[in-house]
Amino acid sequence: MNSPKLTLVNLFFWVLVLVLTALAIGLINDSATAAETRTVETVLALNGDTSEGTIPSSARTRRSDDDVTFRYLDDRFVSVAVTGSFNEWDSVAMELDSESGVWSVTLSLEPGRHRYQFLVEDSAESWEAIDPSNPHIRLIGELGWVSLITVPDDEDDLDDAADEDSDTSRVVVNFDLDLGSDTGCDDEDYWERHGQRFARRELSRQYDDEADNTSFQRVDGFSLRFRPTGISREDYGPAVKGLFSYGFRREEWTLGGLLVQPLLANQRLLARVTAHSGTDFQDNTGIDGLENSLAGVFFREDYRDYYQREGVTVSLVGYPMSTIRLEAGYESSSYSSLETRETWSFADGEYAENPAVDEGMLRCYFANALIGTRNNHILANWESGRNHTGDRFDYSLMKTSYRGRVHMSSSRYMDFRVMYATGLSGELPVQRRFPVGGLGTVRGYRYQSLLTPDPDLVTPLLAKGGQRMLVTNFEYAFSFDTDVIWTPGPDDDWGDFEGFGNIDIDSALFLFFDAGMAWENRTADFDLDDLKSSAGIGFQFDDDGPRIDVIKTLNDGGHNTLVQIRLERTF
């Protein structure tokens, strides 16, 4: 009786994947953005030689009609466009002067400060670049590095801006990068940032969550870590990353390692091998190590479920485009439960018990696809565990999510995310279930608290995540710039703090809504009335600063009204 429902769920999932994939690819092509954000050093490396009178890449203000001419020097590219806050980040194509090798376009901008980037495309890929000859740049959390330009509103300011634009002290660097095995790279800093870029991406996916050398959690307590990393400069040279972590409360070592071996000269096909022995967890919330550690230290909260894992994972990873990552592989791991051992925190009370997992040897095949950029992407995961002799696991599951961003104007945008996951066959082990509730899913409710039980179970399960889940998040953001300027009086002597009073603050106000639920029975009727929801308002002081959210739950079972401080993006 359940097989028709399962078939309909599978059909719905794959149709959803196809639709969202097409939408994601359309957004990528329309916006001409890429997953790479090149830094100042990268763009400087692409500049031409200015010693023979060529024009450096530059945005310059003109006196007439507040026109701004954007220039980018290099005729090796297929196309160059400019995008910025002045046109809601839509791309404007630039024209190439074949004689000078300069791409340029002139736009009429309103007086004030504007952010902009160049969208550069060659025959293989495209990327975002700052203006290499404009020293005024800023790192914006969602945009990466952007250049800043101020269009003055009077003649005096125009003269000052023209003098600033003609500053001859700016340095333009010109070199050729060779990633071959013989000559290596002429610039060490560039190599450290961009050599073997696809291998570096894979290294950043392993243990990158544990960004600090220390952590604190309810099983290992205080931990110290060491993560050595090495990247070969040979054409087919490997990249490696290790993990050595000691938990003082558990008095045990956690050891791990990753080997990335390029299989093609262009690095777009790689073999990936990981080994792990010790404490591990399934990332279900996106909360990073620092934020989770602070939650434990100050609030006695831990948003991860831990287990002991000993095993190896092997996979093939392909990058057919910079904005597409495909992976297929096999895992063989032994799982066992861990107890809560840590008792200390500044907050009163006790830690919630770390849940037990389904123990034994788990062997599974998996496939993952990531299509899109940071703010517009679709992620699909499939996994199938097979019952071998002596194994207890026999299941399959899928999980998909879509995250998008719609710019309403240069200062307003809407972020949204839809996640759906379900078991396809068998009984999902606890360590593969889908928890809903709390940070990263539906704010305002306790971690893992949203679960609709299976009425057919004689003994209801404690909240450990469901075998099916749906989560939606919406966030409407208003960003604004604030310039705080203190002008000293005639009798004030600021000394070395002459410019200390000039502060540039980029802040944002957020309105958000979350809804979601997990179901223990994956074949039960899908009832949207089961969803629990919350809404609230948030404020972030400066781009990368802490964010304060005031959350109101709209159903029973939550905190009613809750104030939270976040350090990372909310979903």
Image: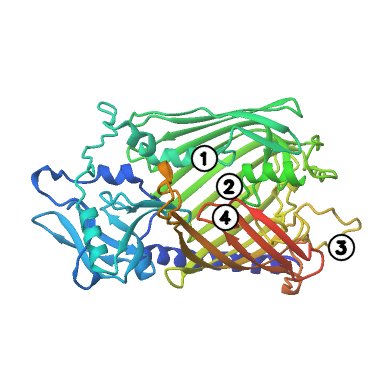
Could you tell me residue 299's position as x and y percent? Answer: 75, 47
Instruction: Say whether residue 429 is left or right of residue 36.
Output: right
Earlier-in-chain disc, 2 versus 1: 1
Earlier-in-chain disc, 3 versus 2: 2
Q: Nearer the viewer, mark 1 or mark 4?
A: 4
The answer to the question of whether label 3 and label 4 lie on touching residues, with beta carbons closer than 8 A, is: no
Q: Against 166, is 17 above or below? A: below
Mark seen at residue 366 = 2
The answer to whether residue 391 shows anywhere in this view is yes
Mark seen at residue 518 = none
Mark seen at residue 315 = 1
- The quarter in which the C terminus is drawn is bottom right
The residue under label 1 is which amino acid type? Ser
Earlier-in-chain disc, 4 versus 2: 2
Earlier-in-chain disc, 1 versus 3: 1
The residue under label 3 is which amino acid type? Asp
Q: CA distance from mark 1 to mark 3?
A: 39 Å
Residue labelled with disc 3:
456
Judging from the image, what secondary structure is the residue with disc 4 in?
loop
Q: How packed is label 4: few (under 14 Cα within 10 Å), some, or many (20 or more)?
A: some
The answer to the question of whether label 4 and label 2 lie on touching residues, with beta carbons closer than 8 A, is: no
